[in-house]
Amino acid sequence: MKQWFSQLTLSERRAIILGGIVVISASIYFLLWEPFVVSHKQLKNIVAVQKNNLAWMQIAANEVLQLRNTSTPKNLLSLVDNSIRKLNKIDKRIEPKGNQEILVSFSTISFTELIGWLAKLYSQHQVQVSNISIKRQPNPDQVTAKLTLQ
């Protein structure tokens, strides 16, 4: 190979060296630099989108907190009464038991619906059950329930 290169004229040697430099430079650019730049741009775009999502979520979280604080009825009786109205035509009785507790009786209610209602009361308004009595009905998933909420 050395003999072959030495037999070439000066201009041919320069052309081969220049061509080699161009090929090596192009290889470095297309195999290393360009993928790095492309992935860097993609990551910058992803970060920008995630920042926008975070800002939107923070605004939405503040709105939810404001709505939760303003939409909560002032006393437990009205809170429970309003939430029971959203259930499907259920025979119920609500009695105040002082300022802090309420006695609620259901003659017949779906157990699944009862548990869902209690979970919603707790998650949205931190209303807890202090006493509960549940009896099965002949129909599947139907119960008679008496509970004290606080």
Image (cartoon, helix red, strand yellow):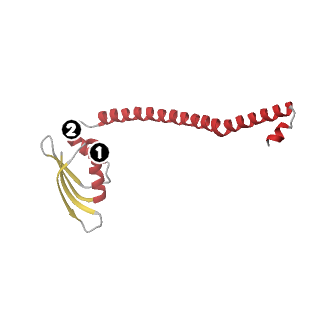
Q: CA distance from mark 1 to mark 2?
A: 17 Å
Please tell me which of labels 1 and 2 falls first in the chain: 2
Residue nearest the viewer, comparing 108 with 140: 140
- Which of the two marks, 1 or 2, is nearer to us in this view? 1
Dot 2 lies on which element?
Answer: loop
- Amino acid found under the numbered disc labelled 1: Ser
Q: Tell me where residue 101 appears, x and y as whole percent.
A: 15, 45
Residue located at (78% from left, 34% from top): 17
**Does residue 90 appear to the left or right of 100 in the view shown?**
right
Q: Tell me where residue 41 appears, x and y as whole percent.
A: 58, 34
Q: Is residue 109 above or below residue 59?
A: below
Residue located at (86% from left, 38% from top): 7
Dot 1 lies on which element?
Answer: helix
Q: Residues within 10 Å of mark 1 (few under 14, many from 20)?
A: few
Residue nearest the viewer, comparing 72 with 11: 11
Residue located at (54% from left, 33% from top): 44
Residue nearest the viewer, comparing 33 with 22: 22
Residue located at (83% from left, 41% from top): 4
Residue projecting furthest to the bottom: 138
Q: Which residue carries the number 1 mark? A: 123
Which disc number belongs to residue 75? 2
Q: Is residue 53 above or below residue 81?
A: above
Which disc number belongs to residue 29? none
**Does residue 29 appear to the left or right of 13 in the view shown?**
left
